[in-house]
Amino acid sequence: MFITCHKIIKGLMVLQTESLGNFVLSLLENGQGREEIEKGLLEKGHDEWFVKELVSESIKLRQTKRRAQGLAFILAGAVICFLSFLLTITSTFSSESFPYVLYGITTMGIIVVFCGLMRVF
């Protein structure tokens, strides 16, 4: 009986932590600062150490997501630049679309790479 109650209480605590984590992530996405979030959670009666750890882990999670998105943008930009290189090499004999391929697609690839770099850093 005690083990079952302990598992239920532990499950509720994990559920509460997950919902608080989602709450903190949503506040971070809305632009609130670390201090504001910590102050709000402390006013609700949560433990100071728990609040600091929760906010810290939420910030790490947000940065990990941004880094993954940034790396995907960098990879897509590199593929676009490589595609531009291949098209430039193969279309050197047709002078009609050469500037569009050489400058247009390469510029798009570089812009996508820099968007990815902005997400990473």
Image (tube, grey):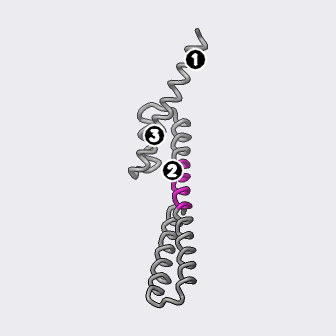
Looking at the image, tell me whether mark 1 or mark 3 is earlier in sequence order.
Answer: 1
Pointer 3: residues within 10 angstroms few (<14), some, or many (20+)? few
**SS for dot 3:** helix
**SS for dot 1:** helix
Reading the image, the residue beneath label 1 is 6
Q: Which residues are magenta?
A: 60-72
Looking at the image, tell me whether mark 1 or mark 2 is earlier in sequence order.
Answer: 1
Residue at 49% across / 29% down in the picture?
15
Residue at 43% across / 40% down in the picture?
23
Looking at the image, tell me whether mark 3 or mark 2 is earlier in sequence order.
Answer: 3
| Disc marking residue 119 | none
Q: What amino acid is at disc 1?
A: His
Reading the image, the residue beneath label 3 is 22
Residue farthest to the top? 1
The foreground one among 29 and 86 is 86
Reading the image, the residue beneath label 2 is 62
x and y, in percent, of residue 87 in the image: 53, 79
Q: Which quadrant holds the C terminus?
A: bottom right
108 up-or-down from 97: above or below: above
Q: Are marks 1 and 3 in contact (CB under 8 Å)?
A: no
17 up-or-down from 70: above or below: above
- How far apart are labels 3 and 2 at the CA level? 11 Å
Q: What amino acid is at disc 2?
A: Arg
The foreground one among 65 and 6 is 65
